[in-house]
Amino acid sequence: MKVAIIGLGSVGRGVAEMIAKKDLGIRVTGLADSKSGCIDPAGIDLFRVLEKKKKSGCCGDKNISALDVIRKAPYDALIDVTPTNAMTGEPGLGYVMQAIKKKKHIVTSNKGPIALAYKELRALAEKNGVALRYEATVGGAIPIFHTLGHGLAGNEILAVFGVLNGTCNYILTRMADEGLTYEQALLEAREMGYAEADPSYDVEGIDAAIKLVILANTIWGNGVKLDDVDRTGINLLTPDAMRLAEEEDCTVRLIAEAIPKKGFLRVAPRIIEKSNPLVVDGTLNAITIETDMAKEITLIGRGAGSIETASAILGDLLFIRDRYVERS
Ligand SMILES: NC(=O)c1ccc[n+]([C@@H]2O[C@H](COP(=O)([O-])OP(=O)(O)OC[C@H]3O[C@@H](n4cnc5c(N)ncnc54)[C@H](OP(=O)(O)O)[C@@H]3O)[C@@H](O)[C@H]2O)c1
């Protein structure tokens, strides 16, 4: 199977490294970052490119763009690991559309295109007879879409509850465990590399809401948008609120929940019993699915990280290889 990778940041590097190290029958024939690209139908030497990227900041030739790779490289599946932009979906949205129109399968970790244009992309993929896979967009390494699409295929999904943002979960865990204020816990999260310099995307619940939209559209196909989510962040939480929860043997977590029968899409800090499986510590993610037959199932795992996210991407790629692509 031949693939092209667009983006060689944290996730792209993890994917390239794992493809290079594991004997999966996957050959990378095109690769691009924001400044350069390379194409080699015989297969790119990934260790050499990763070394070059580390030393020079570029993965290839500055005269070759990501669009050149998408248009000219020979590949079966495009891996889009470019940055998420929740307002425009770009640059991933344009790249993914170009590739689908060329009848290429898509694997993406980029939440922007899937949250903004799920219906359009799904219809375009169906029209062109290609797969659109995005396991890594929600819950990092957690195989939530494989579980929903295959293991739970005969079930009606009644509701979904999730701890979908590791930064918030880390802050809440530290506030509860150490009695830190929100500001102290955020500072610590920044020092640990878990929070961005501008943490608003995480702490205001936007990231969790985007993931909830992707989950809801996948499960119920109801075309919901980010604006449909009733959203409250964790930035106004006080140590007093945490203490009150503690007195009831409860704690606070940022819970994303979707209950379609009640017309309910919400991201908000919630007081929950400590025995609830959604009470995971640190940067972990957790997702509870309520179904008619299997009842409740909770998946817990690492919501981010270079290799952890690459795990989800490889799962999608191998799914496509086995279903659609002859081994080459
Ligand atoms: N990091 C995680 O743990 C994680 C987990 C789940 C999902 N995700 C999602 O996965 C995606 C990638 O995340 P990341 O952490 O790897 O991001 P990142 O480290 O910022 O890397 C982004 C890569 O995309 C490239 N890029 C930026 N603009 C581009 C453009 N216009 N054309 C082509 N390439 C472009 C960058 O090029 P340069 O190298 O030249 O700057 C960089 O190589 C994001 O959408 C993120 O939300 C990340």
Image (cartoon, rainbow, N blue to C red):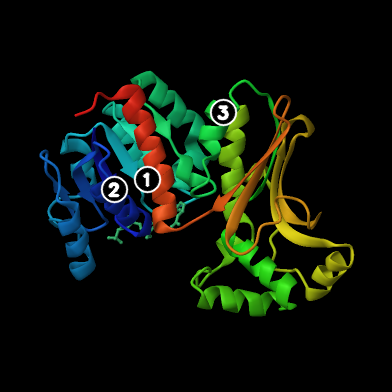
Relative image position of residue 100 (x, y in whole percent): 32, 30
Q: Is mark 1 within 8 Å of ligand 1?
A: yes
Q: Are marks 2 and 1 in contact (CB under 8 Å)?
A: yes
Where's the N terminus, which quadrant?
Answer: top left
For this orientation, the residue located farthest to the front is 23
Q: Is mark 2 within 8 Å of ligand 1?
A: yes
| Lateral position of residue 281 relative to residue 311, left or right | right
On the question of residue 16 being in view, the answer is: yes
Asked if 152 appears above or below 283 in the picture, the reply is above
Marks 2 and 1, how far apart in space?
9 Å
Relative image position of residue 196 (x, y in whole percent): 50, 69
Q: Which residue is mark 2?
A: 6
Asked if 60 appears above or below 44 in the picture, the reply is below
Q: Which residue is mark 3?
A: 151
Q: Which residue is mark 1?
A: 92
- Closer to the N terminus: mark 2 or mark 1? 2
Q: Are marks 3 and 2 in contact (CB under 8 Å)?
A: no
| Lateral position of residue 51 relative to residue 201, left or right | left
- Closer to the N terminus: mark 3 or mark 2? 2
On the image, which quarter does residue 72 sit in? top left
